[in-house]
Amino acid sequence: MRRDKDSDSEDREYGAFERLLARPVPLWSLALVLLLVPLAAMGAGAIVDGWEKSGAVGRAAITLARVPDTIQHLFRSNAPYFGGRYEKLPGGFTRDAAFTDPGYALISPFDPARKRSVVELVRLSDGRNVHTFVPDVDAANARSKFRSALTDVHRDKTAGLNRLMHPLLLRDGSLVLHDSSPLARYDACGRLLWSLDGIFSHSTELGPDGTIWAPYRYPVPREPGVKADFWDDAVAQVSPEGALLKVDRVADILERNGLARLWRGRPYVQDPFHLNDIQPAMTDGRMWKKGDLFLSIRNLSLIALYRPETGRVLWWKIGPWRFQHDVSILDDHRISVFDNNTLMGYPDERVNGHNRLLVHDLSNNKTGSPWEKGFVTNRIATRAQGRGTPLPGGDAMIEETEQGRLLRMSPEGAVRWRYISADSAERRMALSWARYLDPTTDGPAIQATVNAKCS
């Protein structure tokens, strides 16, 4: 049989390839490769750790290091689904018809139809959503210029991924938001008013002078000798117009108050502080004055009373709460603390039975758990995050963040109303720190939002 020239050429090429694969490799070259590969990996790791000081090479190294994360993001759903066990329930709002709540709730659920989080203003007397905010997060991110080993805003915090943490509703119906991303203010129709570049996270609160307080994390850590992804937390004060007025590092606060041992006396970790709440005092108390701040530093299980004008810690306490969130000021001598009650030493960082909403009296150093029965009855157990807002009459609004459940309950556990964040298949999705609004104090903000005309 006659073969054509193309077939002969293919045979010659295939034979050459086989000979190349079968060619013996000198032992010295194999040893050299085995030596150079780990050295190259260590060198690349060193560049990544100090990428911000390595110019173009550092930027290229950190971009390459992020490739696996970027690929993972391409195949991951935007929805913040909860992977643990929970009761299957339809999403949305239900209430006890015998109870009427005069307040409103500002809630940040994930909207499956829009494939992104939104902010809903819910009237609690009937559960009606009276306004939906769809903030233009991408407009804020477009202005961001910082680079960090902690996050890539343009990849990790797009409109589809930004969870719109702890929305703060201002008097004109505008919102202040973030999600370990730039702090930004949007009008009631979602249009960007201003953005402040940087990594702002967790709580957003208004002080008595109208300024905004939020935890801040340096994109490039100031702490010497740490890795590039060290969480260098700080207390940030921002004007209503978006100007950064003050940044005070948690490490410096502890150092100047003789408390550095609380974190320097422990093994090195990338997230030693985890500042998750800044609660300003709106009036004078027995042990504080208007403008002082309660700080919740989760990874030290520490609550501290801090006076920003002098830089002094007036009072501090570790425990009985464990890895807590959400400090609230109840009166002139008591605070409440949402105690996650998490056993971090366990491999799965599990909750020790249930969360708690504790009340601590600074005047006598006593701590109680008035909603204990309610937490047990309703099996409230979010491993991380979580909110607890004591309400007039003895009830509390509780957010079980990871499980996507928000409810108002009595101390005994009677559920007045309930909001479930779930898709049509009843799969739960995390919430993002709801806020209770009282018409007697938040009336103008509520009215401005309801009256907003958005095309």
Image (spheres, grey):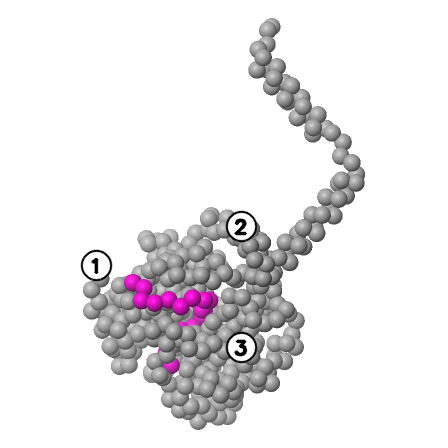
Residue 42 visible somewhere in the drawing: yes
Q: Secondary structure at mark 3?
A: helix
Label 1 and label 3: CA atoms lie apart by 44 Å
**For residue 133, what is the image quadrant?**
bottom left
Check if residue 203 falls in the magenta segment. Answer: yes
| Numbered circle sitting on residue 250 | 3
Q: Is residue 3 left or right of residue 421?
A: right
Could you tell me residue 193's position as x and y percent? Answer: 31, 67
Amino acid under disc 2: Val
Q: Residue furthest top?
A: 1
Q: Is residue 152 left or right of residue 33?
A: left
Q: Earlier in the sequence, mark 2 or mark 3?
A: 2
Q: Quadrant of the C terminus?
A: bottom left
| Numbered circle sitting on residue 67 | 2
Q: Secondary structure at mark 2?
A: helix
Label 2 and label 1: CA atoms lie apart by 39 Å
Amino acid under disc 3: Val
Q: Earlier in the sequence, mark 1 or mark 3?
A: 3
- Determine whether 269 is above or below 58 in the image: below
Q: Residue at x 51, y 69 (%)?
A: 218
User: Where are the magenta residues, as a range?
Assistant: 190-207
Could you tell me residue 286's position as x and y percent? Answer: 44, 94
Could you tell me residue 297's position as x and y percent? Answer: 52, 76
Q: Secondary structure at mark 1?
A: loop
**Where is mark 1, residue-wise?**
455
